[in-house]
Amino acid sequence: MGNELAITEYFVRYLQRRDSLSTKDLERLRTLKTEHASYAPGEVIVPAGSSPDRSCMMLRGLSARSHPLVGRPDDRVITALHVPGDFVDLHALVMAKLDHSIIAVGPAEVEFVDHTELTEITENFPHLTRLLWMATVLDAAIHRQWLVAAASLRSSAHLAHLLCEIYTRLNAVGAASEHQFHLPLLQRELADILGYSPIHVNRAVRDLRDRGLIRWLGAEITITDWKGLTLLARFDPSYLDLERSRR
Amino acid sequence: MGNELAITEYFVRYLQRRDSLSTKDLERLRTLKTEHASYAPGEVIVPAGSSPDRSCMMLRGLSARSHPLVGRPDDRVITALHVPGDFVDLHALVMAKLDHSIIAVGPAEVEFVDHTELTEITENFPHLTRLLWMATVLDAAIHRQWLVAAASLRSSAHLAHLLCEIYTRLNAVGAASEHQFHLPLLQRELADILGYSPIHVNRAVRDLRDRGLIRWLGAEITITDWKGLTLLARFDPSYLDLERSRR
DNA sequence: GGTTTCATCTAACATTCATTAAGCCAACTC
DNA sequence: GAGTTGGCTTAATGAATGTTAGATGAAACC
């Protein structure tokens, strides 16, 4: 009780999109003690190699998991992007050491939750525990889809797939609608995500624009032909597990 | 009690490599009711799109997660390989629908565990639950490393990385030693894993052989220069979270 | 107004990888 | 032993992507 304008609301929506929460579960989530933090673009939220004793939920903006490359310290690969509602590094609860950093992409705001509280949930709230587990398993499903996209799609289609996914995820928690969204993502960062050179990303962006599939002004994206974009990307959202079911 | 030659032994070793198991946890694992099954090469163990009510542990051989491609039914991408000790599709416990198939690679043997039993563990064995959770989170870490490898390594180094990983995982559960192992994996299957054409995989295999890094006869692989192979692949096993720690 | 900075964009050339086609070799069949 | 199959191997060509270099344009600074 208290905490009426629950900080965890986005994450609650993320869960309710996929299962139903008991009053008890909801209550527990809404009374989680959290600590707010804001970050400037590029700032490190959680450093690689650390063993954090808390995990963070995305509130506003974007964050990414960044893997530094051994032997090429100024080079990196981004293996995940996180939008509001994501429990970004929940997996750190059961890992000995983080194998990557969490960084802010554009200005970002997060809420930290102590692992003592999460561990307590695993002791007393089995259904809620399975839902938290689900959140990490869903991240893995997204990783797999990125692997599929990387292996089977060419640059334009690959970029198209990423845009379809981000819009669908934003839309699922009510953070975007009408095929428009804010994406403060540089082409150089896109290159680290897609595994191309920045120049090649530029070719792909131009291609999607030339085909009349998207409009991209500054950080504002409009998907002008959703059907066409999903077709090119062979996008099928079922991996996002958006069905409600009992877990 | 009973079940002395526990079927779950490989998985127990997998967990004990990373945390300690209480007598109670051990007992619960060893009394899991399981159902044995054998598969011929290529056979489907769990089909994509299903909502299985059980999950399987790898006992012998290899299995893979295979993603069929929409619009190209004879094409696929393999996003994970599983060795003995892996709880292959444990994630299905908290997913509504599987986004991929589990298939046998070479002849394979698995043990199925009902989800009712696993759910019961989440109700009464919180520490063991966190260890099961860890197993799925570790799969995700491997997915991420595959993404990093795909984006940052060229064919030979990419193949080298896969070989380093498989050997390390086999070795971690005592299923391989002295840089030798059995790998019943066709070059065409390697192509589906690495995202190359079979012809290009062949070039990569030859390259590693020509450099004197590996010997590959039939399904028997010997890593003749471990140091050189890990250097080429920039292989750092820390993502496999092989440290023992309290979770 | 000029300068700097930084992201986006473009062009020219180099490398990596896919595709097609075909040869090789061992295991198996008739 | 001839034929067949399946996996491995090689070569030649073209498409996709990387690299290097530099142009453009907008915002921030002085």
Image (cartoon, coloured by chain):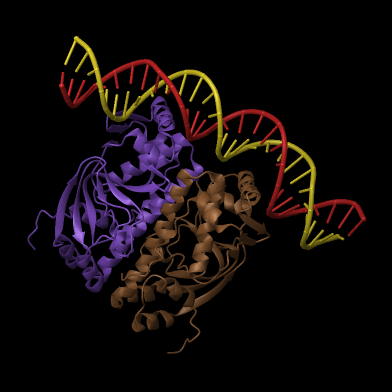
Chain colours: A purple, B brown, C yellow, D red
Is B154 or A171 nearer to us in this picture?
Answer: B154
Image location (x, y in percent) of residue A56? 23, 55
Q: Quadrant of the C terminus of chain B?
A: bottom left
The reply to whether residue B160 is visible in this rendering is: yes
User: Quarter-wise, where is residue B15 in the image?
Assistant: bottom left
Is B129 or B44 nearer to us in this picture?
Answer: B129
Q: Is residue D23 left or right of residue B109?
A: left
Residue at 28% of width from left, 53% of height from top?
A88
Image location (x, y in percent) of residue A79? 38, 48
Residue at 27% of width from left, 32% of height from top?
A220
**B74, above or below B43, in the image:** above
Q: Residue furthest bottom?
A: B1
Image location (x, y in percent) of residue B218? 68, 60
Image location (x, y in percent) of residue C18? 58, 39
Q: Quadrant of the N terminus of chain B?
A: bottom left
User: Quarter-wise, where is residue A91 in the image?
Assistant: bottom left
Count of numbered labels shown in the rendering = 0
The reply to whether residue B93 is visible in this rendering is: no
Is A142 or B151 nearer to us in this picture?
Answer: B151
**A229, above or below A45, in the image:** above
Q: Residue furthest left?
A: A2
